[in-house]
Amino acid sequence: PEQIFSVLGASRFSWLIVLLAFMAAGWIARAWAHSESSPAIQYLGLGLYVVAEAVIFLPLLYLATRLTDRQVIPTAGIMTLAVFGGLTLAVFVTRKDYSFLGPILSISAMIALGVIIAACLFGFSLGMLFSFAMVALASGYILYDTSNVMLHYRTDQHVGAALELFASVALLFWYILRIVMAANSRD
């Protein structure tokens, strides 16, 4: 892990390169997971996405274990599970179609990506407000994805559906963990 940090800390553009590589892997993984060519390609796409998420999470989890209280990661995990469970329950109980959120979420994600790229390029910190906004964005994606799984995906599209939900939950966990880490560092 120390070698990873020396590479990532070498330049403010290092995280931008990691982000671009993650986006490329995510794009390929999504295309494969939603492919109708074969189940093997779909699972390969899901596997690629899981590996990409593991790689991008490694530095954050390492920092969380080294710089904060031992309970930070489990606390963030429980909070993520509670938010995900509550949102999923809301979709199941109301049976509401949240597909209308798609364009709103896409535009919001593009704005967030622009802010992240600007932070990498100009070296400013995103702060807690951005993390809370990203929790809201991830929550919107969970509503959208869960609704799509229930109402729009076919039964043979389970791998693509799993990838979409996994991506949303991972995004939620990332930013909840950042919030919990920041709160812990102030104690």
Image: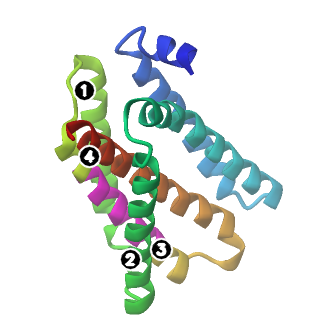
C-beta proximity under 8 Å, tags 3 and 4: no
Mark 4 residue element: helix
Which numbered dot is residue 146? 3
Mark 2 residue element: helix
The kind of residue tagged 2 is Gly
Which numbered dot is residue 40? none
Q: Which residue is mark 4?
A: 131
**Residue at the (45%, 87%) spot, across then down:** 92
**Residue at the (49%, 31%) spot, across then down:** 62
Q: Nearer the viewer, mark 3 or mark 4?
A: 4
Label 3, label 4: how many angstroms apart (C-alpha)? Answer: 22 Å
- Can you tell which quarter of the image residue 154 is in? bottom right
Q: Which residue is mark 1?
A: 118
Q: Nearer the viewer, mark 3 or mark 2?
A: 2
Q: Which residues are magenta?
A: 133-146
Q: Main secondary structure of the magenta part?
A: helix
Q: Quadrant of the N terminus?
A: top right
Label 2, label 4: how many angstroms apart (C-alpha)? Answer: 20 Å
For marks 3 and 2, the one nearer the N-term is: 2
Counting other residues with Cα less than 10 Å from the Cα at mark 3, is it few (<14), some (14-19), or many (20 or more)?
many
Q: Position of residue 88 (x, y in %)?
A: 44, 77
The one of 115 and 131 positioned closer to us in this rendering: 131
Q: Which residue is mark 2?
A: 86
The kind of residue tagged 1 is Ala
Side of 133 relative to 94 (left or right): left
The kind of residue tagged 3 is Thr
**Residue at the (32%, 68%) spot, across then down:** 101
Label 3, label 1: how many angstroms apart (C-alpha)? Answer: 31 Å
For marks 4 and 1, the one nearer the N-term is: 1
C-beta proximity under 8 Å, tags 3 and 2: no
**Residue at the (31%, 28%) spot, across then down:** 117
